[in-house]
Image (cartoon, rainbow, N blue to C red):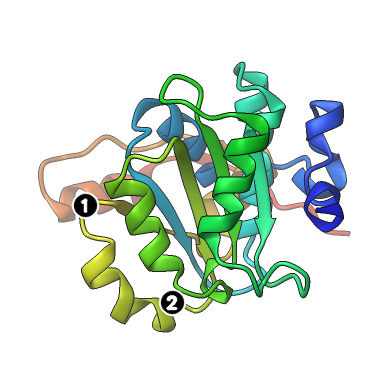
């Protein structure tokens, strides 16, 4: 319980520490919180290599949900590769949190399951949450994409959507540099669009130290 509370300081402060959420937001983080509110009955699975920002995207999603009125004690982050948490299955965790903090269809718990593949029977529990309509909304991450494949075919269809987070993209780099980019219009075919992109003026001058 202490390890769980240490992972969720916003339960008391209503703010995710900046050391966790960072100041620059990935585009996926901007989409996830809206997806959770607009399409709450479809779970989200964020896949990608290690060190690309999956965990940070979860923290940023937590902060956005707090800012948009979700009570902070309904938002629970579980780092499932934590040595004190990885030996417990998801069902008992969810039951305990629902019992302590409440959970209804109108006011569900939001579970952020980081490195979900470390939890035994995680796919069966997500299937159970979905099929039995437990009052939970789920975003999970995993770096072991190959290890998930044989499980998601049966359990995941219609129950969760997969989002792929890749390393920093060129468009994100330009956005960070505050480049003034003129996006070309579509010209009906690939050649016309690419030709317009080549001719488009991009007012970008990289900064050299």
- Dividing the image into 4 quarters, which one contains the C terminus? bottom right
Q: Residue furthest left?
A: 188
Task: Determine crowd level at label 2: few under 14, some 14-19, many 20+ residues with C-alpha closer than 10 A.
Answer: some
Q: Looking at the image, is 4 positioned above or below residue 149?
A: above
Taking the image as shown, residue 20 lies to the left or right of residue 44, namely right
Q: Which mark is residue 145?
A: 2
Look at the image and tell me whether residue 80 can be seen: yes
Kindly state the secondary structure of the residue where label 2 is placed.
Answer: helix
- Is residue 25 in view from this perspective? no
| Sequence-wise first label, 2 or 1 | 2
Reply above or below: 93 against 136.
below
Q: Which mark is residue 84?
A: none
Tell me the element at label 1.
loop
State the image coordinates of residue 44 (x, y, percent, origin top left).
41, 50
Indicate the position of residue 54 as horizontal and vertical percent values.
Answer: 60, 58
User: Considering depth in this image, is 187 or 3 the residue closer to the camera?
Assistant: 3
User: As drawn, is 62 to the left or to the right of 94?
Assistant: right
- Write the residue at 23% across / 71% down: 153
User: Closest to the observer: 147 or 22?
Assistant: 147
What residue is shown at x 57% (from left), y 65% (from top)?
167
| C-alpha separation, residue under disc 2 versus residue under disc 1 | 19 Å
- Closest to the observer, 13 or 145: 13
Look at the picture and state if 27 lies above or below 90: above
Residue 71: where, in percent of width, then height? Answer: 66, 22
The residue that appears at 59% across and 29% down in the rendered structure is: 102
Q: Is residue 198 above or below residue 137?
A: below
Label 1 neighbour load within 10 Å: few <14, some 14-19, many 20+: few
Q: Give the residue pinned by disc 1.
A: 158
Question: Which-is-in-front pick, marks 2 and 1?
Answer: 1
């Amino acid at each position: 319980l202490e390890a769980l509370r240490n992972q969720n300081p916003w339960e008391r402060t209503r703010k995710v520490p900046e050391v966790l959420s960072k100041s620059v937001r990935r585009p996926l983080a901007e989409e996830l919180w809206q997806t959770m509110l607009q399409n709450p009955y479809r779970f989200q699975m964020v896949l990608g290599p290690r060190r690309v920002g999956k965990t940070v995207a979860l923290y940023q999603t937590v902060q956005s949900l707090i800012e948009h009125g979700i009570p902070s004690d309904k938002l629970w982050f579980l780092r499932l590769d934590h040595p004190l948490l990885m030996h417990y299955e998801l069902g008992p965790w969810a039951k305990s949190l629902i019992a302590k903090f409440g959970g209804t269809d109108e006011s569900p718990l939001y579970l952020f399951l980081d490195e979900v593949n470390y939890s035994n029977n995680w796919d069966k529990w997500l299937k159970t949450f979905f099929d039995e309509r437990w009052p939970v909304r789920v975003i999970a991450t995993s770096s072991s994409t190959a290890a998930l494949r044989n499980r998601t075919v049966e359990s995941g269809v219609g129950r969760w959507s997969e989002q792929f987070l890749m390393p920093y993209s060129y468009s994100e780099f330009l956005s960070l540099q505050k480049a003034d980019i003129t996006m070309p219009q579509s010209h009906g075919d690939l050649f016309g669009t690419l030709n317009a992109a080549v001719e488009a003026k991009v007012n970008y001058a990289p900064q050299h130290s």
